[in-house]
Image (tube, rainbow, N blue to C red):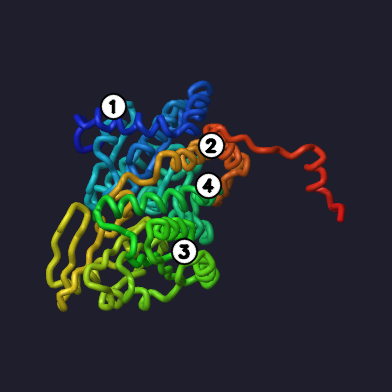
Amino acid sequence: MAKSLIRDISLAPAGRLKIDWVRQHMPVLNVIREQFEQEQPFKGIRIAVCIHLEAKTAYLAEVLKAGGAEVSISGSNPLSTQDDVAAALVQSGINVYSWYNATDAEYKDHLLHLIDDQPDIVIDDGGDVVHLLHTERTERAAKILGGCEETTTGVLRLRALEKQGKLKFPMIAVNDAYCKYLFDNRYGTGESVWSGIMRTTNLITAGKTVVVAGYGWCGKGVAMRAKGLGAKVIVTEVDPVKAIEAYMDGFQPMNSLEAARLGDIFITVTGCKDVFTGRHYELMKDGAILCNAGHFDVEVNKPDLVAMATSRRIVRKDIEEFTLKDGRKLYLLAEGRLVNLAAGDGHPAEIMDMSFALQALSARYILEQAKKLTNKVYVVPKEIDHRVATLKLNSLGVHIDTLTAEQEAYINSLNHAT
């Protein structure tokens, strides 16, 4: 039995069913698993994984283990760990330190246990493990060959460390790969956010006014799916180029205070803090719903909401009602944490198949290139991105063209025909 800090090992059979289900829908990872099983690239290597601990992540961990790695895993958010999945992983021989609804102290303790397993490679989601390796567990950093980062938020934290000259080991920005942000961030977030909202509230979206804060790739997906569900969509932005893009895509950009008066559902996807605060709550309609799809629970300012409320109560699982002095009621989903994971199952398996294939192949790249890499943030090599895309197309039965030698020569020539 693997080492563990989990809720209940007896839940393992239910977790195994979940993992087996997603495995059937992750053909790219299945191909990579077969290769890893044959070649054993990670034999003798310890890998620490800190990603939302649900079935798709569990299968990534099992793929790495199939490649010979000793794998330890923690959840990257206190509300996204699924206890049955954690139990199933322990039974499969993976070290697990995570449980649902961990306190802040418990969550940190889980990450410290992960680090104390002395990994050679780190796969992070949001940068919490890397942060601890640069602050409270610096003695463990020297052993690390490198790591991979899953999210926009985490990549921003890494680039800040790199800019300051403080990054202690090389990291690959998996989030910035085309097969990640074009599909995971847009289609994965777009679908899973609305799945989380709808299953939690059991309310219709059609006819409502939805305010999407942030028009990066995640915001694009959330806005697109809201439009498809029949909502009127407002986008708030600080970037004028993205605001114009939202306008050209058929949405209404405006500042957040104007939007606060109009919205029925507010969704933050910015990666920044204090997107909606007390000054917005003063203007919102009775019954407005607030939720967050950014990595940290700081985008919807909960302290302001608490301070303004005369009473608060849980009215439905993952829905908290705040009654304000004038009688208006505002509703916060999933404590302001990632609504698609804290109140749902996260991205569809077919989407995470590509993202986690990038993680698996990038981890192998770190191992193979360890002597050449310096303490920088690297992009995912083009050949890895293209391999994942090709495997995905193959799984769909789709075949595309390739350039002939003459076409290659033409494109690369300085003397194009006019």
Specify which label sits upstream in the sequence, 1 or 2: 1
- Which image quadrant for residue 292? bottom left
Residue for point 58% across, 47% down: 374
Q: Is residue 249 left or right of residue 127?
A: right
Confirm whether residue 114 shows in the render.
yes
What's the distance in space between the residues labelled 4 and 1, CA to CA?
Answer: 30 Å
Q: Quadrant of residue 52?
A: top left
Q: Nearer the viewer, residue 55 or 195?
A: 195
Nearer to us of marks 4 and 3 is 3
Disc 3 target residue = 215
Tell me whether the residue at label 3 lies in contact with that at label 2, contact meaning CB atoms closer than 8 angstroms.
Answer: no
- Residue at far top of view: 38
Residue identifier under label 4: 172
Q: CA distance from mark 3 to mark 2?
A: 27 Å
In the drawing, what numbered circle is on residue 361? none
Residue type at numbered disc 4: Ile
Residue topped by disc 2 = 392
- CA gap between label 3 and label 1 equals 41 Å
SS state under label 2: helix
Closer to the chain start, of discs 4 and 2, is: 4
- Label 4: few (<14), some or many (≥20) within 10 Å? many
Residue 394 percent coordinates (x, y): 56, 32
Q: Is residue 242 left or right of residue 338?
A: right
Instruction: Say which label, 4 or 3, has the lower sequence index.
Output: 4
Tell me the amino acid under the disc marked 3: Tyr
**Mark positioned earlier in the residue sequence (4 or 1):** 1
